[in-house]
Image: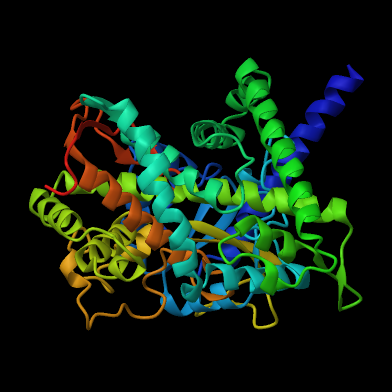
C-alpha cells in the first residue's frame, strides 16, 4: 500500500503545484487584455481546437483582435502566450534578434528525430557564421542577379518542364493543380547547379510527403504514438535519408569541382545556386574570426540548405494554388489576368516586368492568403520587462504573430476580405509592418525577387499553353488550411488542362 500511496501523493502534489503556478501567473498577467477562458485548466485550448476543426483558426484571432486589441494574451492549458498584430511591436520582434529568438523545436527541423533541414540552414540558423552565409547568399538572390538566373530558368520552363506537362495532357486531362505546380517549381533547381538531384517528379512527391507528415509530430499523444510507429512513417524517414544522402554526394562533387579552398566568388557562375551555397558554407566563425570549416561540416550545412530550398519552393506552389482558388470567386479578375499573360509573352527578362496586372494579382494574393500564415518567437524578457505597453514578468514568454491576421486588419486595409488587385496601384505603399508576406527585418526572405520571377514565369507557361477549367468537388472545395503555420491546401484543386496554341 505504501507505493500506491506515495504515487497518488506525488500526483496530487504535482497537480496542486500546477494549479498554484496557474493561479499565480494568471494573476501576474491579468492586466493584459485576454479573452475569457472557458475552462480553468484548459484555458483557450478547447476553443482553439474547435476553431481548427472548423478551419476558422485564424479567423478566431481576427475576432479576438477586434474585441481585445492588437495585443492580447491567450492560454494553452496553464501556459500563457502573447499575440500581437501591432506594427510597432512587430518592428521590435523582427529587428531585435537578441530578445526575440527563433523557436528551435519547430517541427520542420526534423521528423521524429530524423533531421530534415536542421537548425543551421540559411532559414533556421543564427549567429555570426549564419550572418556571413546569409550575406553572401543575398548576392545570389539579389534583384540585380535575376537576369542571369532568368536566362537558364526560362528555356528550361518552356522546354523540359512544359514538355513534361504536354505529354500528360495531349488530349485534355483533369489534373490536380498542386501536383502540377510541385513538379514545375521543383524543376527549377535542376538548372541551378543541381542536375544530379532526383527527377522533379520525385522531388515534388518527396517534399509533399514530408510536409504531410510534419504536422503529425504535434497534436494528441495517441495520434503521435500511432504515427511514430507506423510503416508509412518509416518509409518517409527513409525517403528523407535518401534525399539527404543524394544531396551529400552532390555537395561533395560540387566542392571538389570548385576546389573551394582556392575558388573566388567571381569564378562561380551567377546562376549556380549550389555553387554559391558551397561557397557560403565554407566560412565559419571561430574566436570572432572567419575560418574555413571542415569539409564534412560544410557538406552537412549544404545538405540542410538544399533541403530548405526544396521545402521553400513548395511555398510558391501553395501560393499559386491559393491564387487559382481565389480566382474562381472573381471571374472578371481571372479573365483580365489571363488576357495580360496571353497578350504579353515573356521573351526576355525585361518583359517579366511588363506583367503589371499579374504582379498586382500576386501581391494581393500574398496579402489575402500569404504562404507564411503565422509565426512564433521566444521573448527573452529584457531589462525593461515590457511587451509593448504592457509590463510582463518571468524570464521567457512565447509570442505569436500572424501575417494572415495582420493582412486582414481593418485598421490597415480597406475591405480586407475583398480580393482587389487594383489597390496595388503605382502610388500605394502599405504602412510599415502591416504587410509581411516575405517577413521583414534581418530575417526577411532573401528569395522574394526569385519567387516573384518564378511565379510569373510559371503562370505565363500555364496560361499561354493551356485552357484551364476548374473541376472542384462541390462537396469538398479547396481552401487554405488555417491551422498550419505555413500554407497547406485542404482538398484537391482539380483543373481540366486542354492544350492551346500560345500564339493564338
For the point 12% across and 55% down, which residue is it?
339
Question: Would you say 499 lies left or right of 404 here?
Answer: left
Q: Is residue 376 visible?
A: yes
Q: Nearer the viewer, residue 461 or 403?
A: 461
Residue furthest left in the image:
332
Residue 367, percent across and down? 31, 62
In the rendered image, which quarter is residue 178 located in?
top left
Above or below 139: residue 122: above
Q: Nearer the viewer, residue 372 or 57?
A: 372
Residue 472, percent across and down? 21, 30
Q: Nearer the viewer, residue 403 or 115?
A: 115
Q: Quadrant of the N terminus?
A: top right
Q: Is residue 72 visible?
A: no
Question: Would you say 100 lies left or right of 301 here?
Answer: left
Counting the numbered discs, the total is 0
Colour theme: rainbow
For the point 39% across and 47% down, which residue is it?
157
For the point 71% across and 48% down, which residue is it?
303
Residue 412, percent across and down? 28, 74
Q: Nearer the viewer, residue 456 or 149?
A: 149
For the point 60% across and 44% down, which residue is it?
195
Residue 361, percent across and down? 24, 60
In the rendered image, which quarter is residue 153 located in?
bottom left
Amino acid at each position: 500500500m505504501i507505493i500506491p500511496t506515495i504515487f497518488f501523493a506525488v500526483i496530487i502534489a504535482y497537480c496542486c503545484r500546477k494549479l498554484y503556478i496557474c493561479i499565480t501567473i494568471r494573476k501576474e498577467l491579468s492586466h493584459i487584455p485576454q479573452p475569457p477562458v472557458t475552462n480553468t485548466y484548459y484555458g483557450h485550448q478547447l476553443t482553439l481546437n474547435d476553431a481548427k476543426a472548423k478551419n476558422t483558426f485564424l479567423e478566431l484571432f481576427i475576432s479576438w483582435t477586434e474585441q481585445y486589441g492588437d495585443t492580447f494574451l491567450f492560454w494553452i492549458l496553464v501556459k500563457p502566450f502573447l499575440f500581437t498584430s501591432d506594427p510597432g511591436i512587430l518592428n521590435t520582434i523582427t529587428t531585435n534578434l537578441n530578445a526575440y529568438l527563433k523557436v528551435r523545436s519547430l517541427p520542420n527541423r526534423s521528423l521524429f528525430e530524423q533531421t530534415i533541414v536542421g537548425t543551421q540552414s540559411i532559414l533556421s540558423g543564427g549567429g555570426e557564421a549564419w550572418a556571413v552565409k546569409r550575406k553572401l547568399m543575398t548576392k545570389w538572390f539579389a534583384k540585380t542577379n535575376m537576369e542571369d538566373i532568368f536566362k537558364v530558368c526560362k528555356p528550361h520552363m518552356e522546354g523540359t518542364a512544359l514538355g513534361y506537362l504536354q505529354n500528360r495532357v495531349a488530349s485534355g486531362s483533369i489534373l490536380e493543380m498542386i501536383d502540377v505546380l510541385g513538379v514545375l517549381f521543383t524543376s527549377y533547381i535542376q538548372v541551378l547547379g543541381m542536375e544530379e538531384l532526383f527527377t522533379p517528379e520525385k522531388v515534388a512527391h518527396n517534399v509533399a510527403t514530408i510536409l504531410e507528415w510534419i504536422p503529425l509530430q504535434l497534436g494528441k499523444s495517441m495520434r503521435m504514438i500511432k504515427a511514430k510507429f507506423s510503416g508509412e512513417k518509416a518509409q518517409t524517414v527513409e525517403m528523407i535519408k535518401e534525399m539527404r544522402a543524394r544531396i551529400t554526394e552532390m555537395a561533395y562533387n560540387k566542392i571538389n569541382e570548385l576546389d573551394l579552398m582556392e575558388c573566388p566568388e567571381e569564378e562561380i557562375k551567377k546562376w549556380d545556386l549550389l555553387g554559391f551555397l558551397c561557397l557560403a558554407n565554407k566560412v565559419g566563425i571561430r574566436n570572432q574570426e572567419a575560418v574555413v570549416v571542415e569539409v564534412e561540416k560544410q557538406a552537412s550545412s549544404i545538405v540542410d540548405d538544399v533541403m530548405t530550398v526544396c521545402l521553400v519552393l513548395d511555398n510558391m506552389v501553395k501560393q499559386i494554388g491559393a491564387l487559382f482558388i481565389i480566382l474562381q470567386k472573381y471571374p472578371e479578375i481571372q479573365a483580365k489576368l489571363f488576357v495580360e499573360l496571353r497578350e504579353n509573352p515573356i521573351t526576355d527578362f525585361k518583359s517579366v516586368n511588363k506583367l503589371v496586372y499579374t504582379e498586382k494579382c500576386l501581391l494581393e494574393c500574398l496579402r489575402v492568403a500569404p504562404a507564411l500564415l503565422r509565426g512564433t518567437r521566444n521573448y527573452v524578457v529584457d531589462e525593461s520587462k515590457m511587451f509593448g505597453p504592457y509590463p510582463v514578468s518571468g524570464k521567457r514568454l512565447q509570442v505569436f504573430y500572424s501575417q494572415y491576421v495582420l493582412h486582414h486588419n481593418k485598421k490597415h486595409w480597406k475591405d480586407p476580405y475583398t480580393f482587389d488587385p487594383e489597390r496595388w496601384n503605382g502610388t500605394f505603399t502599405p504602412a510599415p509592418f502591416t504587410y509581411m508576406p516575405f517577413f521583414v527585418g534581418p530575417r526577411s526572405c532573401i528569395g522574394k525577387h526569385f519567387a516573384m520571377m518564378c511565379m510569373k514565369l510559371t503562370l505565363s507557361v500555364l496560361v499561354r499553353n493551356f485552357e484551364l477549367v476548374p473541376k472542384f468537388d462541390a462537396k469538398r472545395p479547396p481552401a487554405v488550411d488555417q491551422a498550419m503555420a505555413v500554407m497547406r491546401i485542404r482538398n484537391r484543386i482539380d483543373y481540366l488542362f486542354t492544350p492551346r496554341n500560345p500564339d493564338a
